[in-house]
Image: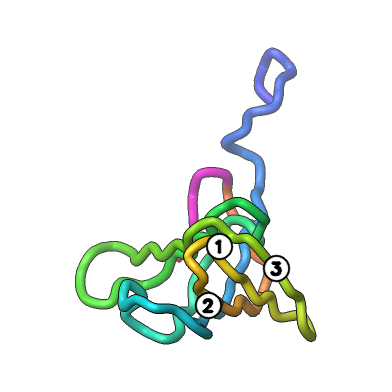
Amino acid sequence: MDRKGTSNHMDQKVKQYQVLFSKVKNDHARLRTDTMEGIATDLPEIDKQFVVYGKPLESGSFRRVNTSPVKQIDNIDGVYFLTTESGSVYSVKVLAEIEADNGNMEH
């Protein structure tokens, strides 16, 4: 709370997810590895891209991978299977839930 009695959003914690993101089926080579461990700020949702941030493959401060919009989500034994608009299928296993400072992603 600030002096005016309003909440300071920068002090709030946000939930993030440590995930294992895996390619099950796709017809392109944009995802250069079959699996990626990283951080997702949201769980998969219908009609939204699923985005994962992780360590860079070569250079840079991080790696960002996103799907095309998700059209179907199946949850089998705690693993999300995403079918996307482009016809690709990915799995997302949540390894841990993380609370981080708002605006400060943990990589």
- Spatial separation of the CA atoms under disc 2 and disc 3: 14 Å
Separation (CA) of disc 2 from disc 1? 10 Å
Instruction: Check contact, mark 1 vs mark 3: CB within 8 A.
Output: no
Label 2 sits on what residue type?
Phe
Q: Residue at left 79%, top 85%? A: 77
Is residue 103 located in the magenta-colored stretch of the structure?
A: yes
- Which of the two marks, 1 or 3, is nearer to us in this view? 3
Q: Can residue 25 be seen in this view?
A: yes
Side of 6 where 24 appears, left or right: left
Examine the residues drawn in magenta and state their main secondary structure: loop
Chain-order first, disc 2 or disc 1 = 2
Q: Which quadrant would the N terminus be assigned to in this image?
A: top right
Label 1 secondary element: strand
> Which residue is drawn at the image coordinates 49% and 50% (left, top)?
104
Magenta range: 102-106
Numbered disc 3: secondary structure? strand
Instruction: Name the residue carrying label 1.
Output: 40
Mark 3 neighbour class, 10 Å CA radius: few under 14, some 14 to 19, many 20 or more: some
- Quadrant in which residue 100 is drawn: bottom right
* Real-space Cα separation, disc 1 to disc 3, in angstroms: 16 Å
Q: Which amino acid does label 3 sit on?
A: Ile
Read off the residue under disc 3.
73
Dot 1 or dot 3, earlier in sequence: 1
Total numbered circles: 3
Along the viewing direction, whichever of 4 and 105 lies nearer the viewer: 105
Q: Is residue 20 above or below residue 84?
A: below
Up-down relation of residue 29 to residue 70 (above or below): below
Identity of the residue furthest to the right in this view? 77
| Badge 2: residue crowd in 10 Å (few <14, some 14–19, many ≥20) | many
Q: Mark 2 and 1 residues: CB-CB less than 8 Å, in contact?
A: yes
Q: Mark 2 points at which residue?
A: 21
Please state the horizontal and vertical placement of residue 5, each as a whole percent of the image.
74, 18
